Amino acid sequence: MVRVACCISRKHASQTRLRRVGDWYTIGLALGIGTAIGTLFAGMLSSTPLGRAAAVALGAAAGALAGVVIDDWAEVGAGAVGGLAGAAAGVVVVAGALRRGGTRTGLALLVAAAATGLAALAFVPGAGYLEAVALPVLAARLRRTQADRHAGLRSLARD
């Protein structure tokens, strides 16, 4: 009888821990899942300018839908912001890689693998917030440092 009471109190303790974690975990989860979904859309659609715009719009919409599945309105907004951030960052990376000679299929597979990793990482408490902030910052930094496809050949043309 004591053992049953012990198990019931453990179950109650785990439920109260989850309640204490509360909304900040689910909002971070929605941000992370939205970021992963937006990145996935960027990998699939970023071969044309119209596809890039569609990837950003669909990433935000799919992130919001993920927020609906996760919980309530706070998660819907977080999922939309995450989808927007992930798609915008993914578009920069994919467009740069295509400009430098990457293949569409290969890039789509690599970005899909990265998006899967981002989605798995979103379940770590606090990681979704980091994803939603770090990806656009890294993409902006990458965009500033991108060279053209044959930038080194221009120096040979002067001789």
Image (cartoon, rainbow, N blue to C red):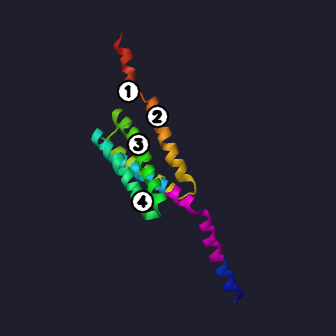
**Residue behind mark 1:** 148
State the residue lying farthest toward the bottom: 1
Q: Mark 4 points at which residue?
A: 66
Judge whether 18 appears above or below 105 on screen. below
What residue sits 41% from the left and 56% below the top?
64
* CA distance for labels 1 and 3: 20 Å
Task: Give the main secondary structure of the magenta stretch.
Answer: helix
Q: Residue 27 in the image: x percent, y percent?
A: 52, 57
Which of the two discs, 2 and 1, labels the residue nearer the N terminus?
A: 2
104 above or below 2? above
Please report the bounds of the magenta region as a residue range. 10-29
Q: Are marks 3 and 2 in contact (CB under 8 Å)?
A: no
**Residue type at numbered disc 1:** Asp
Q: Nearer the viewer, mark 3 or mark 2?
A: 3
Side of 121 relative to 43 (left or right): right
Q: Is residue 28 magenta?
A: yes
Q: Residue at x 40, y 21 (%)?
A: 152
Left or right: 83 with respect to 28? left
Circle 3 residue: 88
Percent position of residue 116, x then y: 44, 54
Q: Name the residue under label 2.
A: 142
Q: What secondary structure is found at the residue carrying circle 4?
A: helix
The one nearer the camera, 99 or 79, is 79
Q: What element carries label 3?
A: helix
Q: Which amino acid, mark 2?
A: Leu
Mark 3 residue type: Ala
Q: In which quarter of the image is residue 14?
A: bottom right
Circle 4: residue type: Ala
